[in-house]
Image: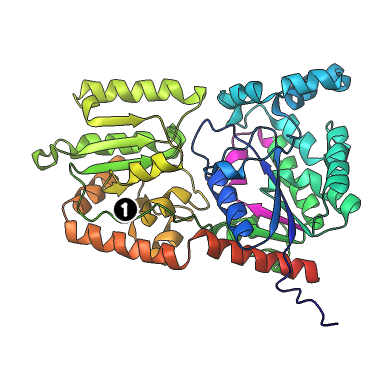
Amino acid sequence: MKPMNTESKPLNIIHLIPGTGGSFYCENCVRDGGLVSALRDLGHNVTMVPLYLPLSFDKEDLQEDTPIFFGAISTYLKEKFPVLGNMPNWISKLLDSQPLLKYAAHKADSTRAAGLEDMTLSMLRGKAGNQSHEVEHLVQWIKHELKPDVIYLANALLLGLAESLKEGLDVPLVCAMEDEDIWLEDMEAVSLKKIWEVIEENSRFVDVFVPVSDYYKAKIQARLDIPPEKLRTVHIGIDLEGYSIASEPVQPRAIGYLSRLAEPLGLGILIEAFMMIKTDPQFSDLRLRLTGGETSDDQRFIAKMKQNLSAKGLLGDVDFIDHFDRQSRIEFLESISVLSVPMLKEEAFGVFLIEALAAGVPIVQPRLGGFPEIIDRTGGGICYEHNVPQVLAKNLASLLQNEKLLRKLGQQGRQAVESYFDSEAMAKRMVKVYRDVIKT
């Protein structure tokens, strides 16, 4: 009998993914949804297991009936009130029903780490933490329902599961890494130090980590004692279906913003830059278009921004767009001339940049985090020094005045996304990682 070619054999893969409930634009959701869809298109069997909150993806056919583990509401209550640790299962199921979890997703605590120090540590301690029963429940469910060749953890904050998964299933573990440091940095210093120590301790159970950029790979190497051979960059790609370059320049000209409408993501800087540009009569037609959703934490900031715009007589020149599903994002990108999300912190990647470039929209970003890496690889935009409104305004205005350069950058960006940053290329890079760890 001819031996089976293991390089072409479909893989059985489990992806453990924290949900967001769909309340705001989530880069990790775009990443993981695109990856799963592309892996399935390549013939692999992928089961997604949601943690904390319901999964929210662009494609309806990705939605599954897989149960949610570590439901956010019951997990939070059990951590805060240990007496509830033995609450009946029917109460836990009621608290973690889809409607209640989606409501919880819109609250501030779903995106704010401060105050969650104890629960984060408990989750990272896995079977030694307060969620040990749920850890065992997850492992036993996988053991009886699925036979994975490899398990993917969507971020390093899930490493509390690693030891039990290894012991109970004896399969390779691959862990993505993206902006864990940004989410954790608002925590109390003593707890933060301990959290990173536990992450490092748990890292020994993981076969390979896959940071989403070379920038973040270097950052993790500097922070954690992980052998270099266990870190392999896998850049993010997106599904290009529906994205195309506009045949004519956008009229009226518009600056776009695609991310959660939040102060830490640089929305205030962009709005100030827009107000500066609008003082020049040649930009009287210019609009600002914003989309990406919000949480209750962001509402006071957004109200303040609207007041500032109104005081300048510019609120009517700004569009706040509620819908940010896949089709809405494509239509949004078709309506803008340039995109900028001038984040205040060093983000690992920036999926919104790849989406803009897929539509032939140039990007203008601060020289922070993984942004220069994307612009260098694509040639689709401009990186500027000093992330302040005055510098951003100057760069945006200069680009908006040069239609030829706008077109050139957009075309270069689109070509680079087609050749490297599409979801199939990402999936093939990940399959190479999976097959390598399965062999060892």
Foreground pick, 115 / 149: 149
**Residue 52 makes an appearance in the image:** yes
In the image, residue 274 lies at what x, y percent?
A: 25, 37
What residue does disc 1 label? 361
Q: Which residue is drawn at 54% across and 62% down?
A: 424
Quadrant position of residue 207: bottom right
Q: Residue at x 39, y 60 (%)?
A: 375
Q: In the rendered view, does 317 fall on the left or right side of 64?
A: left
Q: Which residue is drawn at 75% across and 23% down?
A: 74
Range shown magenta? 173-189
**Residue 234 makes an appearance in the image:** no
Identify whether 205 is placed above or below 159. below
In the image, residue 90 lies at what x, y percent?
A: 82, 19
Q: Which colour scheme is used?
A: rainbow
Q: How crowded is mark 1: few (under 14 residues within 10 Å), some or many (20 or more)?
A: many
Foreground pick, 358 / 61: 61
The residue furthest front is 1
